[in-house]
Image (cartoon, grey):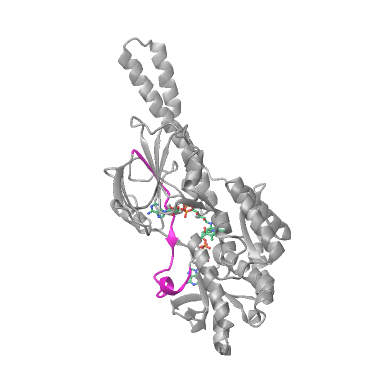
Amino acid sequence: PGEQLPQDPSKPTVVVLGSGWGATSFLKNLDTEEFNVVVVSPRNYFLFTPLLPSVTVGTLEPRSLIQPTRFITRHKKRDVLVYEAEARTVDPINKTVTFEDISEVKGKKGSVTIPYDYLVYAVGCENQTFGIKGVREHACFLKELSDADKIRSKLMDCIETAAFRDQSQEEIDRLMHMVVVGGGPTGVEYAGELHDFLIDDLKKWYPEVADRLKITLVEALPNVLPAFSKQLIQYTESTFKENKIDVLTRTMVKDVGETSVTVQDANKETREIPYGLLVWATGNTSRPITLDLMSKLPATQTQRRGLVIDDYLQLLGARDVFAIGDCTATQYAPTAQVASQEGIYLASVFAKLGQKNKYERQLADLRASGTASADDIESVVKKLNRATKLTPFHYSHQGSLAYIGSEKAIADLPLFNGNVASGGGAAMLFWRSAYVSTLYSVRNRTLVMTDWLKVKLFGRDVSRE
Ligand code: FAD
Ligand code: NAD
């Protein structure tokens, strides 16, 4: 780190908001020579979300999936500033960002506004609740590391409470009922992990109550995993049936109470389902800061689903703002795969921008010198023209993978222009190796593989932190 170039006031400043998939892949691929980079995120680390469901039952330990943002920035050519703070507002007219320290420990300075030359907006999304009452108060989400920790702890609390002396049968059934709302990949993967925990560990450690554990997945549409192929949907649903995971399709949650949820089925009949733990995974919605930014650009930002960008990932209606990942509304699904490819592409746009700035400076110097030949000027103009030519972003889909429990995974792989669908043990091996090889650092890979080995040898840890 000592060898890094210092920040250079004569070069433009790029402010990056976020430290998730989009921001991290951008930072990893960015050449910082021509820019001063500032990163602002309330989380000072990158989280490898595809393996997050494994943390809810202790298959993986939380810290195996995270990597400090400074791990990437400290290896950059030029010093990158990283602030643990939440951006509160973006002013696209005056080109400023205001951010605030929202962590527990606060210093005398807790809020600041800084100018940007370029803004990379990659703040992701928050959990969708459709305004259903009681969700935020009583349900657990599965998006952040703290969510997975909370689920793990609450799950064990339910089991311990069910095993409490003289607990009534009815109360044991309620406490041991784990309800998952949303049959997208998040809900499905979580249900699969929970099933494994029951079979591999709970039966050994809590024989008195383990058999009472019931998993119910509630999905509003006619089937789970609407984005996967028909064959894989059937494979998942039949695996769930074998694993005694109850799937209630065409069923919508209408209300959430402290100990039960109200659901409505296809016949519009409503009923109450008592639960011990409720996991809510019904997808994404825009963050308040994103809605606020949209409201400042009413002529172009008309989609509540997310920010509207052009083929070069530039925010419509603003100057020098790029938006990537889940916070945007594009033709692509909000996935890590899309966000990371956008990050890589955007770094290549910045490579061109950097060159453009460099050649413009060279040209100005040549012209100011008064001694440069026409050929010299012409050659720089040519380079400048090349640097201003951009190709639009192109997404290349590598396939979708999901773990569904009992050592089975499903994979939708685009091969030879068609979709090859596969499921089962081979997909499971593929799933594991695919994730291990995309985990960012050797350190993370080692941690994840060690966790898998630990669980194989000793089982999962059932202590409650
Ligand atoms: P994020 O990765 O969510 O990052 C957003 C960042 O912005 C975070 O660092 C956050 O702290 C920060 N931030 C938030 N608010 C502010 C603010 N006000 N100011 C500054 N920073 C802010 N996708 C796949 O392709 N494959 C998978 O297998 C897969 N599995 C998943 C499993 C789970 C459990 C979940 C929840 C998601 C999964 N996804 C998967 C989806 C994937 O995680 C997202 O699409 C991806 O994280 C989007 O990247 P992003 O950078 O847009 O947002
Ligand atoms: P999602 O949007 O994919 O699925 C949410 C599901 O909840 C939908 O099927 C919807 O019909 C259902 N739903 C909504 N309201 C409901 C209600 N009131 N009652 C019952 N069901 C209701 O959400 P997700 O699973 O969190 O995924 C978010 C994004 O992250 C997606 O793009 C997904 O592809 C990606 N992701 C990918 C993977 C993977 O590839 N393995 C894993 C997790 C997430």
Residue 244 percent across, percent down from the top left: 66, 76
Note whether 138 is above or below 100 in the view shown. below
**What residue is drawn where x is 48% and y is 51%?**
45
The reply, left or right, for residue 295 in relation to residue 223 is left
Is residue 4 visible in the rendered image? The answer is yes
Asked which quadrant contains residue 15, the reply is top left
Q: Residue furthest left?
A: 94
Q: Foreground residue, 208 or 250?
A: 208
In the image, residue 119 lies in the stretch drawn in magenta? yes
Note whether 408 is above or below 376 in the view shown. below
Residue 202 percent across, percent down from the top left: 65, 74
**What residue is drawn where x is 52% and y is 47%?**
340
| Extent of the magenta region | 117-140
Residue 449 percent across, percent down from the top left: 66, 54
Q: Foreground residue, 358 or 28?
A: 28
The reply, left or right, for residue 434 in relation to residue 94 is right
Asked which quadrant contains residue 106, the reply is bottom left
Q: Foreground residue, 456 or 389?
A: 456
